């Protein structure tokens, strides 16, 4: 993941569009907070133009 | 070159090897291509000159499945690829007789910026000239050997073979650039500039798959890009798959195993600097996990397939 994130930065993909977090099934609050803050972040960034995947259009 | 042919002939005649894997003369001096030679007579077409950039290691995967030993000529950088394949159990060391050949830097016809080239002389081995004489439709011109060299030779890993049975021929140092300078230049750009740079380079891609086919690290029997489930198996002009996904996936699949042999950039008909992806991974691996050169030996643990408690966490280096 470290290498992938570094590569995405190298390619000019916006910082913040990718994230990795370890959340245990027992950590409901952490899960909720992580998902909400990440959803907020990517909504702010708008549609992912730089990392569009054509497979999503199939 | 004659020395190589004679050695190959004597090994063939003595029955020590069943075939020879080397380079064959092409239509033009710069068209030398990999070829198997089954007999001493066939070796008349054998060639070893400045245009023999092709890395023969990958062919040893198939050669290993044939009866008898195969004599293969490996340049210093090719021997790293062979070692890496050996480590991945893709080639059989017992089935290979390796002659490590000297290298004085390899040339690219695309680096000779003249129109109507008819012939290039001075690329012979071992007697490589300082200046190449280029015969063109518009008269004779000259270019320095160094200037026509492949990008990878300017940042050569060294002229020591890492695996061989015997060595033949001399080498000379060709390094005159920093391996990671170009990567650092891109790293210093803003995200917008980086994206624009890669979009411009990658949009040239015609998805000929040459980079994948030539790569010694890409040796899967079944490749993800040949899947018919996605539209990834062929070039569709209407999409930007090549710009956005193909090359990232390709580079990621060989991360940690790429020896930086530079074959991908050499064969790209569109001149895309594909080594910039591989080198970014190599640079990051060196910085995060310690200096590592894939293929340099068979013992060092590969950083991406070996867990240590010192491994970098995913968030490292993120702003």
Image (cartoon, rainbow, N blue to C red):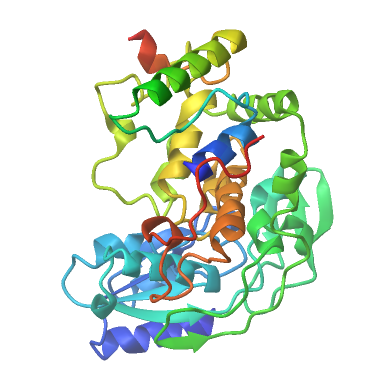
Q: Nearer the viewer, residue B72 or B86?
A: B86
Residue B49 falls left or right of residue B246: right
> In the figure, residue B82 lies in which quadrant?
bottom left
> In the figure, residue A17 lies in which quadrant?
top right
**Relative to B293, residue B189 above or below:** above
Is residue B160 something one can see in this rendering?
Answer: yes
Residue B284 falls left or right of residue B227: right
Question: Measured from the top left, where is residue B16 in percent x and y?
Answer: 25, 87
**Relative to B124, residue A56 above or below:** above
Query: From the image, which quarter does the N terminus of chain B lie in?
Result: bottom right
Q: Nearer the viewer, residue B19 or B280?
A: B280
**Relative to A32, residue B224 above or below:** below
Residue occupying image coordinates x 70% and y 27%: B191
Q: Nearer the viewer, residue B229 or B252?
A: B252
Is residue B18 something one can see in this rendering?
Answer: no
Residue ranking furthest to the left? B67
Residue occupying image coordinates x 67% and y 67%: B123
Question: Measured from the top left, where is residue B303 in percent x and y?
Answer: 45, 60
Query: From the image, which quarter does the C terminus of chain B lie in?
Result: top right
Question: Measured from the top left, where is residue B76 in percent x and y?
Answer: 54, 74
Question: Measured from the top left, where is residue B28 in percent x and y?
Answer: 57, 54
Residue occupying image coordinates x 28% and y 62%: B61
Q: Nearer the viewer, residue B234 or B229?
A: B229
> In the figure, residue B52 lies in which quadrant?
bottom right
Residue occupying image coordinates x 57% and y 56%: B288
Q: How many marks?
A: 0
């Amino acid at each position: 993941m470290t290498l992938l994130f570094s590569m995405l930065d190298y390619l000019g993909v916006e910082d913040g569009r990718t994230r990795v977090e370890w959340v245990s099934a027992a950590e409901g609050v952490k899960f909720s907070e992580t998902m909400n803050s990440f959803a907020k972040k990517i909504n702010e960034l708008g549609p992912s133009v730089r990392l569009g995947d054509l497979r999503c259009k199939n | 070159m004659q020395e190589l042919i004679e050695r190959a002939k004597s090994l063939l005649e003595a029955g020590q090897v069943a075939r020879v894997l080397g380079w064959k003369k092409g239509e033009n001096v710069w068209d030398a291509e990999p070829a198997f030679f089954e007999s001493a007579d066939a070796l008349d077409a054998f060639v070893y000159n400045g245009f023999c950039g092709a890395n023969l290691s990958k062919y040893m995967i198939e050669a290993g499945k044939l009866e008898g030993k195969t004599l293969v000529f490996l340049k210093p950088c090719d021997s790293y690829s062979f070692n890496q394949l050996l480590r991945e159990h893709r080639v059989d060391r017992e089935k290979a007789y390796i002659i490590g050949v000297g290298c004085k830097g390899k040339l690219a016809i695309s680096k000779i910026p003249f129109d109507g080239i008819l012939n290039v002389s001075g690329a012979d081995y071992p007697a490589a000239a300082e200046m190449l004489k280029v015969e063109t439709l518009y008269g004779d011109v000259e270019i320095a050997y160094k200037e026509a060299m492949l990008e990878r030779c300017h940042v050569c890993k060294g002229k020591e073979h890492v695996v061989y049975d015997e060595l033949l021929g001399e080498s000379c140092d060709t390094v005159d650039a920093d391996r990671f300078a170009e990567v650092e230049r891109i790293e210093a750009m803003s995200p917008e500039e980086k994206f624009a740079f890669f979009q411009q380079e990658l949009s040239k891609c015609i998805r000929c798959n040459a980079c994948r086919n030539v790569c010694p690290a890409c040796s899967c029997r079944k490749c993800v890009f040949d899947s018919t489930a996605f539209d990834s198996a062929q070039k569709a002009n209407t999409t930007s798959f090549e710009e956005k996904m193909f090359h990232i996936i390709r580079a990621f699949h060989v991360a940690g195993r790429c020896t930086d042999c530079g074959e991908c950039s050499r064969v790209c008909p569109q001149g895309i600097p594909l080594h910039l992806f591989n080198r970014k991974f190599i640079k990051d691996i060196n910085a995060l996990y310690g200096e590592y050169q894939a293929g340099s030996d068979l013992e060092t643990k590969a950083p991406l397939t070996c867990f240590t408690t010192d491994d970098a966490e995913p968030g490292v280096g993120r702003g």
